[in-house]
Amino acid sequence: MKKTPLSFFLFTKLIFLYFHLPEKVKKMKLHNNLLALLLLYFLFLNGCGSSNFANITELENQYQNSEKLIPENYPEDDAVIVYRKQKVDVSVHSGSLYYEITTEESLHSVTKLFRNIEDYASYKIYLHEGDHLKEISARTVKEDGTEVVLESKDFYHTTGSSGGSTVFTDERAVTFTFPQVAKNCIIEFNYTVTKNNPFVHDEWMMQSYLPIKKNIFELMAPRILVIDEVKGGFGWTWRYKPYNFIDMPDVVQKNLINPSGSTLDAKFVNSWVLEDVPAFEPEPQMPDHDLYKGYMKFTKGEFKSWDDVADWYWSNYYIGMNVVSDEIRKKATELTTGLKSEEEKIQALYNFAQGIRYVSLYLGNGGLRPHEPKTVISNSWGDCKDKATLLLVLLKAIDIESFPVLALTRDDGRIDPSFPSYSFNHMILKVKAPSGKIYWLDPTLQFAPLNEIPSSLEGMNVLVVYSEKSGKIERIPSSVAQDNLVKIDQIVSLVGGDSTQFNVAITFKGDENYEYRSFFKDKTPKEIDDYIKSMVIGDMGNIRVKSWSHSNLDSINVPFRFNFTFSTSGAAVRQGDLLLLYADPLQLMSKLNWLKKDTRKYPIEFSQPYRIEKTTQILPLTNFSTRNLPEPISLENQNFSFKKSFQSGPKNEILVSEVYEVKSQWVLPGHYAATKQFFDKVKAKLNERVIFTRN
């Protein structure tokens, strides 16, 4: 990082040296090298120096009195975005038979920090396929006005990431950290990205998690680009749609000054200006924020229908991918020989595609274009597009029809059926069997049974690409609570003084079935021990895992079973001749931190509807008899149900039955008060203990 005065000092030194060179040096013509160095340094200062930055004094002076940029005027906010400008400059490159559009997109942001400073000290710029960072600058302006400017070495270019699976990617990112941040400082950055594939992932962030004083968006383009083809232009257009923003101003369009007078040099600019945009305040366990936060989405002008989107994807990235090669036909025959029913054959091919190692690869056009299926088999790895396309051609080889499905997972937003655009991050398959039965298959799910879809896609709109010219928005079916069943059987006994032993058997069906298979795949014994301890409520204390086992991970067509035994000294408490037993220590209900507020503005979202059925058998306690059993309870509303009962068994054991069900994925704000009341009663019942008295 460098301070601006040092740059000025070096520049003046170079000037001094140039005009005071000895005559001997001038005769050697070395002064020409120094002149070249001077010119290069001057260009560097103009390209990467403070000339890209805003005049902070002028910006702050715009806001006085009640609008002054001080912490007292923003008691609920950590910071305020003083100025944000996003600019898109469109260029046209024409040939004899076609024309191509590229853009340069710049973002300039100035933010004043008040509190929780370190939360805003670092920034990351994501680069999609076809994006190239052209220039970037950033600085911190301290409260006393001195500035610290980042040098090129302070910007870290990263490629590749890793998560739950092996990932290799050139979906690049640039990260940097603002230096010497402190209360009332300014952080500012300005960067430009060239895009070879514009208006695919493009959005304007109209609203942020911080208030914005001024937010500007500009699109600049050559006039000839939008002139009708019959009048000698290109007939290009763009499409956009604002979301979740009230009082959206009209776009302002103006023609820019054209000194040359040439039609080719004439440009226009479209702009929007927003002022005093309030911060978006999310709530815990709400749906994806883009369903409620203000933003504007852009798309290619040629995307007038979903058929156009399908055509664009197929023509550019999918041609030839559905061709069945001899190798593929041989592999399909090998995998299905001896199988009779269509479901058995689909299952066999699906299992093979699932077994291909998942590797997310975005090299070149890899973010959009799958690899050839025979290459995927040869490599024995592939991403979602590779695995879905491999399964498509394997099915086609045995005359079963299927179609690629472009999807957007729940955590990244929703597809708007009324606004055709390319906003997808995943590919699965829709299979239409000869019998007419429909299967939705995601081969990236290594342990999922046939027709099991991840919760992140349930009920979501997707684009089914039926052919080169045909695409249709369809909704993936949603599950019901009974589809996602967790069944718990536990036996409780008092062993050795006050230690309580729990023998637990849990069976997972549906979403939890393959989630737990994936979870246990690479876990060490210690990690499984730690996981069992984490399932027990925090105040049990002295938890000792004695044993555990689980069913075969590869037996995906049957529910997954997990058995374990543990003991704890915290479940039984003696009070004189009384013994209070807490017989239900497992934390399987989702955390309820989203119930803290008295009211809610946004819905509550669960990953999917689900049901927990629990039976507990408390074995007879030596020298003790039952003094008190808690009263039964039965609660139900349109979103939840809970039932729990206690009874004595024929052999003096105590039998506890409990059923908890989340009926719907969303709980609307209007049902929030009833939801709070429901869980207040449930929590009270969960904390009840069975009371025994000494004989």
Image: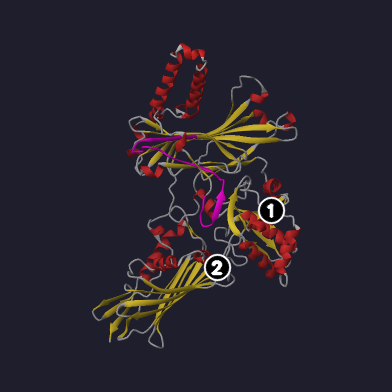
Disc 1 is placed on an element classified as: loop
Q: Which residues are magenta?
A: 161-190
Specify the quadrant of the image occupied by residue 139.
Answer: top left
Question: In the image, residue 7 lies at what x, y percent?
Answer: 42, 25
Q: Which residue is mark 1?
A: 372
Question: In the image, residue 41 lies at what x, y percent?
Answer: 48, 24
Quadrant for the N terminus in the image: top left
Instruction: Classify 470 as above or below 208.
Output: below
- Residue farthest bottom in this picture: 650
Residue 83 can be seen in this image: no
- Residue farthest left in this picture: 576
Q: Label 1: few (<14), some or many (≥20) within 10 Å?
A: some
Marks 2/1: CA–CA distance: 32 Å
Foreground of the two, 355 or 31: 31
**In the image: residue 390, left or right of residue 522:** right
Residue type at numbered disc 2: Gly
Q: Which residue is mark 2?
A: 510
Instruction: Classify 91 as above or below 461.
Output: above
Q: Label 2: few (<14), some or many (≥20) within 10 Å?
A: many
Asked if marks 2 and 1 touch (Cβ < 8 Å), the reply is no
Q: Residue at x 67, y 32 (%)?
A: 93
Specify the quadrant of the image occupied by residue 61.
Answer: top left
Instruction: Classify 640 as above or below 192.
Output: below
Q: Earlier in the sequence, mark 2 or mark 1?
A: 1
Question: In the image, residue 107 lies at what x, y percent?
Answer: 51, 35
Residue type at numbered disc 1: Glu
